[in-house]
Image (cartoon, rainbow, N blue to C red):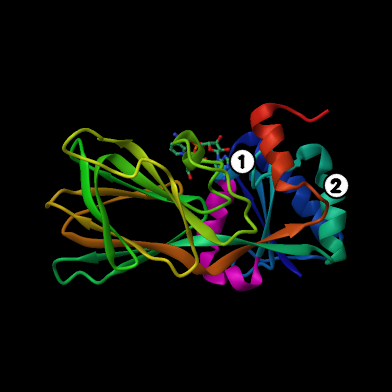
Amino acid sequence: MKFAVISRGDEHSNDIKSKLQIHLENKKLEMDNDNPNIVITVGGDGTLLYAFHRYKSILDHTAFVGIHTGHLGFYADWSVDEMVFLALEVAKEQAQIVEYPLLSVELTFHDEQAPISYLALNESTVKSVAPTLVVDVEINNAPFECFRGDGLCFSTPSGSTAYNKSLGGALIHPSIPVMQMAEMASINNRVYRTIGSSLVFPEHHIVKLYPNNQDQFRLSIDHLNSIHTNVKTITFKVSERTVRFARYRSFPFWNRVRDSFIGMGR
Ligand code: NAD
């Protein structure tokens, strides 16, 4: 089995990375930064997001596991104290693989620009560079609403605990293949109306945004941001692809929610 270790880049994470590599090589595992079967991140959730995007072309034969060198993360849920145990478990090559849903995003343009496709592990947000985002929202080819406000956030179940949570969206167990649309400060008065609640869509449902004007759009895909002009449509759906996580011990999602947001369990 081939492995890669990705560090956040700070001194402590780099030190843990070096120690982990030695442990794994002592167990006769081969390091391969280009085509690993297992990617171990050392840092935080952001480090795992970075690694996901680095290896997104080989998701079908790569699994991820995260060590946190700061606070407990949702993806980075192994502590530094557990590193030796984790190395032993990785070397046994008997991981349980759990698959989490991903979000597919596609942009089309009014001019000849080719469509652009993205894959998100946490979420994708759309904001206007102008003060207010104005977009027509279509669900499964039927007009739904005209959204005016700061922006819209489309999240995966595993991303529901990230930006989506700050927006008041629901927390969704990652075993359910859905995407969630949450509003950012929508304008609601006698003239403008949006649904107000977060919406949860099953697989194969498609949400399409039609910009109402020639504004520039700020699109985020996890930690990555880009600005686009001449946008015709932005389409969101549950991706046909999934991300694989290697599990070596039980740490249920709801326990991670409790430990991260409520405090450690009794
Ligand atoms: P960052 O360093 O600003 O991290 C933001 C925080 O989000 C960190 O505490 C991280 O642990 C946490 N986080 C990331 N993924 C999570 C998940 N799936 N569940 C629970 N917490 C999670 O930025 P970064 O490390 O580059 O991470 C980018 C992420 O930051 C984005 O995907 C987005 O979810 C999040 N974000 C949140 C807000 C907000 O809550 N208002 C705003 C912008 C971005």
Q: Is mark 1 within 8 Å of ligand 1?
A: yes
Image depth: mark 1 or mark 2 in front: 1
39 sits left or right of 230 in the view: right
Which mark, residue 191? none
Q: Residues within 10 Å of mark 2 (few under 14, many from 20)?
A: some
Residue 58 forms part of the magenta stretch: yes
Q: Position of residue 212 (x, y in %)?
A: 15, 52
Circle 2 sits on which residue? 84
53 sits left or right of 258 in the view: left
Residue at (13%, 68%) from the top-left corner? 111
The residue lying toward the viewer, choosing from 23 and 124, is 124
222 sits left or right of 251 in the view: left
* Quadrant location of the N terminus in the rendered image: bottom right
Q: Position of residue 56 (x, y in %)?
A: 52, 65
Circle 1 sits on which residue? 44
* Quadrant location of the C terminus in the rendered image: top right
14 sits left or right of 155 in the view: right
Residue at (53%, 46%) from the top-left corner? 160
Residue 15 visible, this angle: no
The residue lying toward the viewer, choosing from 53 and 232, is 232
Residue 48 forms part of the magenta stretch: yes
Tag 1: amino acid: Gly
Range of residues picked out in magenta: 47-62
The residue lying toward the viewer, choosing from 112 and 125, is 125
Residue at (47%, 36%) from the top-left corner? 168
Q: Main secondary structure of the magenta part?
A: helix
Q: Is mark 2 within 8 Å of ligand 1?
A: no
Tag 2: amino acid: Val
